[in-house]
Image (cartoon, rainbow, N blue to C red):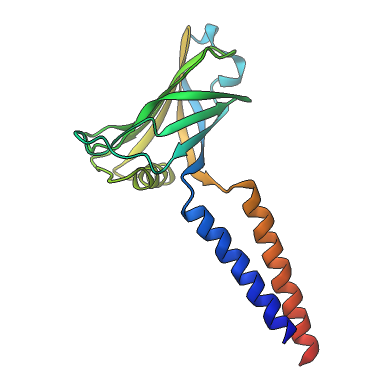
Amino acid sequence: MRHISTLKWALVAAASTLAVQAHAELQTWRLTATAYKQAAEDALPDYVSLGSTLTVDYTIDTQTPSDTTIPGFFSGAVVNFSFHGETSDAQGYLSATGSGLNAINIWPVSMRNDTLNFLSFNLFTDKTSPDVASALNDFASATANPGGADWTDLRLDFNNGSVWAKPESFAAVPEPGTYGLMLLGLAAVAVGAKRQRRHH
């Protein structure tokens, strides 16, 4: 009977983890992209050279309400972002208005050491999203399927130059505690299964 209790505990732990994630307002979404074009390249940092992999982490409030007069416009949805080891509080918006160009357009609240001053993650689509979660899934889907009707592009503007990058992936990053709980649950399941084999 003990192995049954262990299995139940593991399932409860896993379910609790999923429930916490499902109701979390703040989520981290990671964008990876490959630089393919530059403007004023002599003024750009070396780490955004052509062919380099760029990674942007967005902290997004998925409960941000849509603008009352513009459906699909979510002002302030991005709380902060991280790029090249530097995190900045963000201003800006997530637009999923179905106007042909949806975008996550943000800029840092304070001046950054790397002089990055504007990020534009664009989704070329005619879809209007009712909420932030749906919009993020649309961005992720278009990024994962670049040959489809919808497609994405990233532009980073620095004080004296810009770089464009082809998005390769855009996905939610599990919270650190999630990994621990999941591993704990898997370990408990393994122990329970081992005990069950001993008794049979």
Rendered-image quadrant of the C terminus: bottom right
**Considering depth in this image, is 23 or 99 the residue closer to the camera?**
23
Total count of labels = 0
Up the image or down, 74 lies above or below 200; here it is above
Q: Residue at x 46, y 37 (%)?
A: 60
Occupied quadrant, residue 1: bottom right
**Image position of 148 (left or right of 6):** left
Up the image or down, 107 lies above or below 68; here it is above
**Image position of 120 (left or right of 55):** left
**Image position of 9 (left or right of 167):** right
Q: Residue furthest left?
A: 69
- Residue 28, percent across and down? 52, 40
**Considering depth in this image, is 7 or 150 the residue closer to the camera?**
7
Occupied quadrant, residue 149: top left
Confirm whether residue 39 shows in the render. Answer: no
Q: Residue furthest bottom?
A: 200
**Considering depth in this image, is 113 or 36 the residue closer to the camera?**
113
**Considering depth in this image, is 173 or 121 the residue closer to the camera?**
173
Confirm whether residue 182 shows in the render. Answer: yes
Up the image or down, 22 lies above or below 151; here it is below
- Residue 196, percent across and down? 74, 85
Q: Residue at x 59, y 12 (%)?
A: 113
Q: Residue furthest right?
A: 198
- Residue 89, percent across and down? 51, 24
- Residue 41, percent across and down? 51, 10
